[in-house]
């Protein structure tokens, strides 16, 4: 199904309050809401997967897994030096 895009400033007060209740936060006039309905169990295109049930960080957070402290320090210092050359 296609995505439905609405500008918050164009939504009447009652509908806006309903959206804020569903989303769980106040919406500003400068914002948009995008609604997409999919079949249960399917991942919508462009939408990140929800976090794993364990509540821990996603796998991509383990970028230094398997490296020694010296290797991690070397990678960080090397990147810091590279950033300073560009600036």
Image: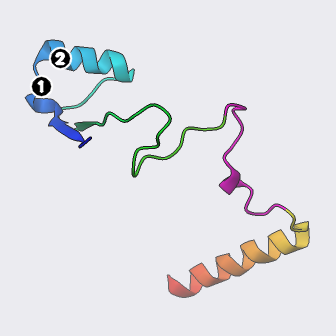
Please tell me which residue lies in front, 16 or 74: 16
Q: Is residue 53 above or below residue 22?
A: below
The residue at the point 16 percent across, 12 percent down is 14
Query: Looking at the rendering, which quadrant does residue 60 occupy?
Result: bottom right
| CA neighbours of label 2 inside 10 A, class few (<14), some (14 to 19), many (20+) | few
Taking the image as shown, residue 8 lies to the left or right of residue 70, namely left
Cβ atoms at labels 1 and 2 below 8 Å apart = yes
Can you say which quadrant of the picture contains the N terminus?
A: top left
- Tell me the distance, in whole angstroms, between the alpha carbons under discs 1 and 2: 6 Å
* Magenta segment boundaries in residue numbering: 53-65
Taking the image as shown, residue 26 lies to the left or right of residue 64, namely left
Query: Looking at the rendering, which quadrant does residue 55 occupy?
Result: top right
Taking the image as shown, residue 52 lies to the left or right of residue 25, namely right
Residue 16 place in picture, x, y as percent: 20, 20
Residue 30 place in picture, x, y as percent: 19, 39
Q: Is residue 67 above or below residue 77?
A: above
Residue 1 shows which numbered tag? none
According to the picture, the residue beneath numbered tag 2 turns out to be 15
Query: Looking at the rendering, which quadrant does residue 75 occupy?
Result: bottom right
Number of labelled discs?
A: 2
- Is 80 included in the stretch rendered in magenta? no
Residue 11 shows which numbered tag? 1
Q: Which secondary structure lies at badge 2?
A: helix
Residue 73 place in picture, x, y as percent: 82, 71
Residue 49 place in picture, x, y as percent: 53, 43
Please indicate, yes or no, whether residue 30 appears anywhere in the rendered image: no
| CA neighbours of label 1 inside 10 A, class few (<14), some (14 to 19), many (20+) | some
The residue at the point 39 percent across, 20 percent down is 24
The residue at the point 24 percent across, 42 percent down is 3
Q: Tell me the chief SS of the magenta region.
A: loop
Q: Is residue 84 above or below residue 47?
A: below
């Amino acid at each position: 199904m296609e995505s439905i895009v609405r500008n918050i400033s164009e939504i009447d007060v009652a509908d806006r309050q309903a959206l804020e209740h569903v989303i769980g936060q106040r919406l500003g006039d400068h914002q948009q809401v995008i609604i997409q309905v999919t079949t249960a169990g399917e991942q919508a295109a462009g939408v990140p997967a929800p976090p794993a049930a364990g509540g821990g960080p996603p796998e991509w957070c383990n970028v230094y897994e398997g490296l020694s402290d010296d290797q991690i320090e070397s990678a960080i210092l090397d990147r810091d030096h590279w950033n300073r050359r560009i600036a």
